[in-house]
Amino acid sequence: MRPEILFPLFAPVDRLKGVGPKVAPLLHKLAGPLVRDLLALAPTGVIVRRRTTSAEAVEGETAIFEVVIDRLIRPGRPGVPIKVRASDDSGFVHLVWFHGSTNHIERLAPPGERRLVSGKVERFGGEVQIPHPDHIIPLERAEELPIVEPVYPQTQGLTSRQIRRLVESALALAPELPEWQDPAWRARQGWPDWRAALLALHAPTGPAELLPEAPARARLAFDEALAHQLALARRRRSRQVAAAPRIVPGTVSEALLAALPFTLTGAQSRALAEIRADLASGEQMGRLLQGDVGSGKTAVAALALADAVSSGFQAALMAPTEILARQHALKLIPMFAAAGVEAVLLTGRDSAAERRDTLAALADGRAALAIGTHALFQEAVTFRNLGLAVIDEQHRFGVSERQRLQAKGDLATGGVHLLTMSATPIPRTLELTQYGDLDVSRLHEKPPGRTPVTTAVLPQARIGDVVRRLGAALDRGAQAYWICPLVAESEAVDLAAAEARAADLTRALRQPIGLAHGRMPGAERAAVMDAFARGELPLLVATTVVEVGVDVPNASIMVIEHADRFGLAQLHQLRGRVGRGARASACTLLYGGEDAGLGETARERLEILRGTEDGFEIAEADFRLRGGGDPLGLRQSGFPAYRFVDPVRHRALMQAAFDDARLILARDPDLTSPRGAAIRVLEHLFDWRPDRPGAD
Ligand code: ADP
Ligand code: MG
């Protein structure tokens, strides 16, 4: 239930004076449908006007002059600007209009009268000019001329000044609200209370107050982050109280560990220990295993799966693509079979008969482990006693998909442990906002025996050299990927491009070449990938189907055409396919292509990849480079759209909000204290979800 004190803020913005049927839809689009939304529309600029004189005026400043109007200079012919000459004691000021009516201008600036004139100063020759003055008013109305004026983001049909007026009437509706922030914390930050912060937000006195760290903005950002972290912390708590099966390592785990062809790294062992503590706790696990491409997440997951099976529960491993699901199956099914455990693969491409068998084996519990794609959570799939669900490359799934898989087990056992994995392209900066409800284990360290990848950034014109060097490397027994992006409007055109490239390379290199793309029948593509994995094909020309998870340690060369058309995070994932074996690895990023104009900026962006192999650094750089925005399609995947928080600049505040939220709920889980009541107000006020049920 929304607290009554917030009702005025949740009134439709349409009820403000001056909002008619024309303005309302514009406001909805710009800010949102509610008074609260308009108040959250922060100014993006501020005009500060300075009193000056013709002699002292500085080019580019917004200034106020006190002048006497001398005369109007009528344009001799159309297309020539209308000018008014005015003067003060130090010289002339020319007011200029490139369009407009002479009569109107004459009324605004009648010759012989004294006026205050304001606008942006240009110096043209020796002359001071003000093109399209924003104010011309008689001296006795001087107070109408604001010295400072916020500038709002505009939209077609709605000026900044109109918005400012509407914001003013919205501000009049803002009540004093109880303080939800910890008083000591707020005092330490030197922040105003909520209402004062809102007033200050809309009345900046200079550019410094537009910065994310200005007290008013920082306070509102913290409020917003706290509201969001509270929601995440609640979700985490509700999972903790849900009972879940107790899972401990057993014989299958031991067999699997013995079967691994390597010993776990320190990072892998630590992550596994964290996971095992959760699994044994009797509370439902919600953990993210995060590690850069190639950090060895699969082995950790496999041992957790083995623990579940050892304890008599079924376990499931879900991957976002068929290739990846197959690759997991290829490795894990034999290992589990050796331990006497039946594991099945379920994808969308199984024959009807295969599928029937698989489903039966899962339903009666014969199969203890299921590996598969989205097919795993379709309605027809039932588990006898699912205890653990592992989701690989979880950022490729929506929130609802992972919940659906988890729900498969909730029916049978009352709770399924959830382990999600990601070589996340999400910068650390954003981690808290995305994963505040999950506990995180990280694999910082890579398995031994990795070779650094040497990355080169070259214009497309150098493709001849690249092919020549590639040929020499293949002759020495290397294997390579050649990536053609999906770029054109039509997939058919892209495919043709990939096929043409494969044909070119076949001619130039005189080697067998495999082609893999998303439109091939799954079995055919799997056959090509397998042949490449077995070393039978020296070169694989592919579209981005190899991006996720593919593991062929002998492959040591990667060429990416039109690299400038990929996101950096995606390029990093692609490059992660090489550098996995003993051979020195190389990655060549070709940029530019036919549209040579793209050249410089594209190259600069790609240089980031040349400089580092650290996925987090790359994601962070990419994020900055794109100026925030929505670089990774996060919004679509349930990522919050913040109005005040700048995830890069407010990083420390977000951490504080994360800690504070957990503390608040630990002390007062039902929010019954006075601060708890204030927290409820906060949660409603900053909940931007459009489709909230029970609007009042
Ligand atoms: P990712 O974290 O990207 O999913 P994988 O689990 O596919 O990485 O592991 C990448 C490669 O590293 C695989 O070939 C795997 O067999 C190997 N690997 C994993 N752990 C170790 C280890 N502790 N020592 C040596 N190699 C390992
Ligand atoms: Mg993986």
Image (cartoon, rainbow, N blue to C red):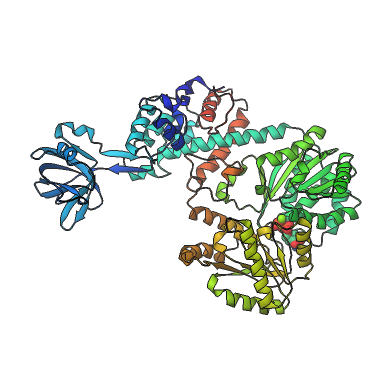
Quadrant location of the C terminus? top right
- Residue drawn at x 81%, y 54% is 329
Q: Residue furthest top?
A: 4
Circle count: 0
Task: Tell me where residue 157 appears, x and y as whole percent.
Answer: 37, 38
Task: Tell me where residue 18 appears, x and y as whole percent.
Answer: 35, 27
Query: Could you say which is closer to the camera, residue 58 or residue 194?
Result: 58
Q: Is residue 505 above or below residue 345?
A: below
Q: Is residue 418 left or right of residue 178?
A: right
Q: Is residue 446 above or below residue 35?
A: below
Q: Is residue 327 left or right of residue 611?
A: right
Query: Could you say which is closer to the camera, residue 291 or residue 153?
Result: 153
Q: In this rendering, does residue 483 appear at all?
A: no
- Residue drawn at x 65%, y 48% is 395
Q: Is residue 653 above or below residue 21?
A: below
- Residue drawn at x 85%, y 46% is 352
Quadrant location of ligand 2? bottom right
Residue 448 location, quadrant: bottom right
Task: Tell me where residue 52 appears, x and y as whole percent.
Answer: 18, 46
Q: In this rendering, does residue 661 appear at all?
A: yes
Query: Could you say which is closer to the camera, residue 211 or residue 55?
Result: 55
Task: Tell me where residue 469 appears, x and y as whole percent.
Answer: 63, 78
Q: Is residue 655 above or below residue 625?
A: above
- Residue drawn at x 87%, y 39% is 363
Quadrant location of the N terminus? top right
Q: Residue furthest front?
A: 77
